Amino acid sequence: MTHTIAVIPGDGIGTEVVPEGLRSVRRAAELFGIDLSFQEFDFASAAYWQQHGRMLPEDWFEVLQGFDAIYFGAVGWPDVVPDHVSLWESLLQFRRRFDQYVNLRPVRLLPGVPAPLAGRAPGDIDFLVVRENTEGEYSSIGGRIFEGTEREAVVQETVMTRTGTDRIVRFAFEQAQRRGNHLTSATKSNGISHTMPYWDERVAALGAEYPDVRVDKYHIDILTANFVLHPDWFDVVVASNLFGDILSDLGPACTGTIGVAPSGNINPTGAFPSLFEPVHGSAPDIAGRGIANPIGQIWAGAMMLDHLGHADASAAIVDAFERVLAEGTVRTPDLGGTATCSDLGQAVAEAIKA
Ligand code: GGG
């Protein structure tokens, strides 16, 4: 059986890390006898925007829906396209139209990565952020009135549906049952007085169906503080779209660098392709210098192989980058080294063992 994969490097360092991710995915596929076929697309990029005046072709949905998975780099090049336009006209369309309602973002302190928090060792920080991915604060409902006048006003709505809330909370409870039976919910129900109390209510109601899972909840302000001070307190963290986005950048930053963080935008029904990407964006500040850390993209490739049913190949990639990082001879500047993106990508691919 051949798995078909749509490859979309996007912008900035996306175009640098995607080839390195593919190098490891291809090597693992070769060693484990997995048949993969790749097709690369140039859309979802500033260059495509400049040529076509849009981020995606009109038939993008029909084109991409036939693939088994999407391997994505990064989006955003604000000198050319405003960030809210590039995001809403590409990645957020994929998440919504392919109903990738789960955004899985593992956070782990990796061996050999200098941890910013003294006294933490690999194993101490290992948790999973389960981010709601199709609604919430990313609703697109709102607008401006009286623009350019003193009465100028702007409104943006948050939308939480029962279906959307329940399905992400259930997914998180199920993840908690597979891990340490501990779920933390991110809320702000003291200040946000409609949607967040509703979120809390649904977590409490569904919790009754998972009596083996210990549930705690924190307001997002103290939760961010606890991510920094006590990242070892967490196992599975469930959060709304915006809170999950923030927590899943902060988590990896507490483990040394956001450059290693992967993400899976999952449609659990399999009706449409899931999408795998690093957590980081296009990083215009370092783009074109060849110094981006490719581990987040490589790890996203491992998540993709796992999703496609190849847990052994996925584990071999993770084992390879853990060994390379532990050895510490090939490190990109964010890890305190001088290696290039390509040096680290090559070292990981060569370290993969069947
Ligand atoms: N590789 C991920 C990426 O390009 N992220 C850009 C970004 O700002 N994403 C926002 C989000 O994930 O909601």
Image (cartoon, rainbow, N blue to C red):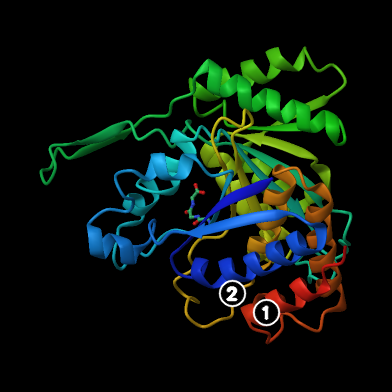
- Ligand 1 under 8 Å from disc 1 Cβ: no
Where residue 282 appears, x then y in whole percent? 48, 65
Dividing the picture into quarters, in which one does residue 328 lie? Answer: bottom right
Q: Residue 109 occupies which quadrant of the picture? A: bottom right
Few, some or many residues within 10 Å of mark 1 (<14, 14–19, 20+): many
Q: Which residue is mark 1?
A: 332
Please report the residue visible at 49 percent of the width from the left and 35 percent of the height from the top. 98
Of the two numbered discs 2 and 1 on the same chain, state the one appearing first in sequence: 2
Q: CA distance from mark 2 to mark 1?
A: 7 Å
Marks 2 and 1: CB-CB under 8 Å? yes
Disc 1 secondary structure class: loop
Instruction: Please identify the quadrant where the N terminus is shown.
Output: top right
Q: Residue at x 55, y 81 (%)?
A: 290
Indicate which disc residue 58 carries. none
Image: 175 above or below 68: above
211, 289: nearer the viewer = 289
Could you tell me which quadrant the C terminus lies in?
bottom right
Q: Secondary structure at mark 2?
A: loop
Task: Kindly identify which residue carries mark 2.
Answer: 292
Q: Residue furthest bottom?
A: 338
Q: Residue 253, how many percent across, how many down? A: 67, 60
Q: Is residue 142 visible?
A: yes
Q: Residue 277: give x, y in percent of width and height.
A: 58, 54
Is residue 279 visible in the rendered image? The answer is no
Q: Nearer the viewer, residue 168 or 223?
A: 168
- The amino acid beneath tag 1 is Thr
Residue 60 % position (x, y): 37, 45
* Rendered position, 106 above or below 211: below
Amino acid type for the residue under numbered disc 2? Ala
Left/right of residue 18 with respect to residue 108 in the rendered view? left
Judge from the rendering whether residue 330 lies leftward or rightward of residue 47; answer left or right: right
131 or 124: nearer the viewer: 131
